[in-house]
Amino acid sequence: MKRTTLMDDLDAGKTLALRILGGRDLSAKALEKRLVSKGTSEETASKTVDWLKEIGLINDAEHACSIVRHYHVKGYGLARIKAELFRREIARDVWDDALLVLDDAATEDTALHFLEKKLRGSRERNDLRRAEDALVRRGFNYEEAREAINKYLEIQDDPD
């Protein structure tokens, strides 16, 4: 009967981790949980994740920046982006640097672009209310949504 050593477990853990990462990026914490759920011991999972960090295959800061850029381009607000970072198990201390990409002007432009696409020139009260609610669901706060609606109406009033 073959005896399994810690080294064999570590090699198996590394192989499994590389196969999992081949499909998509994961945070260190998410990968560690995934390895344990696949039968790897917690110690082996932790050592495997440390190894992957050392060789640069896991970088939570880069992963967080990628998530922020992706969801910002898709038109989501700060609250929704933070919820996605939380869901993806990115440590909160990593969020701050990643969220520096979002400035007020970019947030306003994103909300305005969403409104232009959603409303297509409509000024109907019900359409505006629905669009404002949609912005809030997308992660913008009420103040940002209201400001975007006002800016949208200004643009609609301006013939140039």
Image: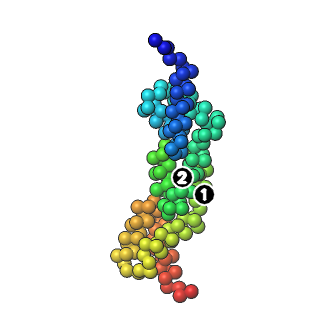
Where, by quadrant of the figure, is residue 128 drawn? bottom left
Q: Kindly tell me whether residue 27 is visible in this rendering.
A: no
Marks 1 and 2, how far apart in space? 11 Å
Work out whether residue 72 can be spotted. Answer: yes
N-term mark: 1 or 2: 2
Quick check: marks 1 and 2 in contact, CB under 8 Å? no
Residue placed under numbered mark 2 in the picture: 67
Residue 13 picture location, percent across and down: 52, 29
Residue at figure coordinates x 45%, y 59% from the top left: 139
Q: Residue at x 46, y 11 (%)?
A: 1
Query: Of residues 59 and 11, which is closer to you in this image?
Result: 11
Residue 36 placed where, x, y %?
Answer: 45, 31
Q: How far across and down, in percent of the image, does residue 156 sit?
A: 49, 82
Task: Give the residue furthest to the bottom.
Answer: 159
Amino acid on which disc 1 is placed = Val
Residue at image point 64% right, 34% down: 54
